[in-house]
Image (spheres, rainbow, N blue to C red):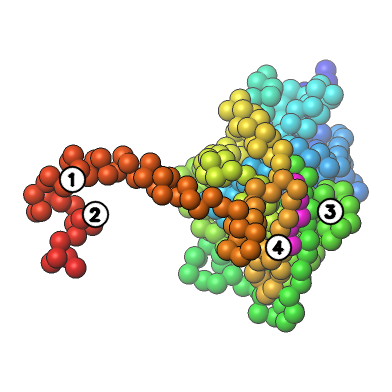
Amino acid sequence: MAREKVILAYSGGLDTSVAVKWINETYNMDVVTFTCDLGQGRELDAIKEKAIKTGAVDAIIEDARNLFVDNFVWPSLMAGTMYEGKYPLATALGRPLIAWRMVEAAKEHGATAVAHGCTGKGNDQVRFDVSVQTLAPHLKVIAPVREWKWTRTEELEYARKHGIEVDATKQSIYSVDQNLWGRSVEAGILENPWIAPPADAYKWTTDPLTAPDEPVEVVIEFDQGRPTHIDGEPMDAVPLIEKLNEIGGANGVGRIDHVENRLVGIKSREIYEAPAAVILHHAHKELEFLTLSRQAQRFNTYVSQTCADIIYDGLWFSAFHKSLMAYVSETQKFVSGHVRVQLYKGKITATGMKSEYSLYSEELATYEEGDKFPHETAIGFIKIHGLSQQTQARQQLLKEEPSMRPARIMPSAEDK
């Protein structure tokens, strides 16, 4: 009788390599590994070979970079999602995509379960489990690392005992995850928030102190909220991000040191490198200042924070998120134009912007010749604007005893 199959999210690292053999033994299931290329920069052919050698009955490799950017990264950028104002959600954006593709792989291979290598106190376990249970409630979710609760030493010993080749050693101090949109680093010495991140924690970005002494300017063009050109050159999504990662990283842009609030209730110190994400979020926000109304900008502050929480918390496939993204898409209709940014020693500054849909009118804003602002209407506007406050003051506040008046609103002579 054929054994049941499980689709395992596979990176080729210590946890997932050991998981192949462990699932074979513990669940008596055949393992089909699934590796999604989101631009993590690893040799995929070698990963496939290693999976088969480790005991997988099949190894799926899928290039999902364009799918990732078009359907996850760009919508997130358009919504302005930066978790807690700092983290551009690189890893969090990749997990629902991987979960979705694993569900599809399970259908194709007749698998009855999916598996991942997440720990019991991280965010990724939630993102995988919730996404899979939403898209395919009939699939069982297996999380070996969450179940076995081994120390790193015990895990390495299991790998040695079963002849599993792994690159990890007990001296490895960082846990790293990366894709096109960013690189995250945690563990080791970084677990002490007082200690500055060592130089070896960074791989994508130059130390701002040693970055070039001359600033670099880049012009980014957007079409309905999506980046399309760099310095006038039309570019597909993946190479556009890669180029900005290169330019930004060389100038020390994109380093993030964040003590963040994890969904599971603990704080975690994370180091992120995301040059392209930081540059594009900054430029996109500046273009929105030019093209969105005051009301839309203010409301978008709430929408951005809410969408960031939804993505971080693993609720990408929720109906609420779908509804919010419909609103976001509507707001981006006129977010088209050019933004010029200056990159210099870790800092990014917008130095110019233009759009055919700009709500900025020079003839209304200028104090020079050509001023067309209707100055004569200002007095009437001011009277109507202040009417409710003046009425309340006359009927209520001015009738109070001096000692009862709020000092900060109506200071007395002593307060002065």
Work out how far the residue at label 3 is from the one at label 4, CA to CA, in angstroms.
16 Å
The residue under the point 84% across, 24% down is 108
Helix, strand or loop status at disc 3: strand
Q: Earlier in the sequence, mark 4 or mark 2?
A: 4
**Outermost residue toward the front?**
376
Evaluate if marks 1 and 2 touch, with contact meaning CB atoms under 8 Å apart: yes
Q: Where is residue 64 in the image (x, y as percent from the top left)?
A: 83, 41
Q: Earlier in the sequence, mark 1 or mark 4?
A: 4
Q: Quadrant of residue 71?
A: top right
Quadrant location of the N terminus?
Answer: top right
- Crowding at dot 4, Cα within 10 Å, few <14 / some 14-19 / many 20+, comes out as some
Residue under label 4, please give it: 352
Q: Where is residue 318 in the image (x, y as percent from the top left)?
A: 61, 28
Q: Which amino acid does label 2 sit on?
A: Ile
Residue under label 2, please give it: 409
Taking the image as drawn, is residue 379 in sight? yes
- Crowding at dot 3, Cα within 10 Å, few <14 / some 14-19 / many 20+, comes out as some
Q: Give the range drawn in magenta.
A: 336-340
Work out how far the residue at label 1 is from the one at label 2, CA to CA, in angstroms.
10 Å
Q: Where is residue 407 in the image (x, y as percent from the top left)?
A: 19, 57
Q: Looking at the image, is mark 2 or mark 3 nearer the viewer?
A: 2
Work out how far the residue at label 4 is from the one at label 2, CA to CA, in angstroms.
40 Å
Q: Which of marks 3 and 1 is nearer the N terminus?
A: 3
Q: Quadrant of residue 187?
A: bottom right
Q: Is residue 339 covered in magenta? A: yes
Helix, strand or loop status at disc 4: strand
Q: Which amino acid does label 3 sit on?
A: His
Depicted 112 relative to depicted 330: above or below = above
Residue under label 3, please give it: 229
Q: Which amino acid does label 4 sit on?
A: Gly
Evaluate if marks 3 and 4 touch, with contact meaning CB atoms under 8 Å apart: no
Q: What residue type is labelled 1?
A: Leu
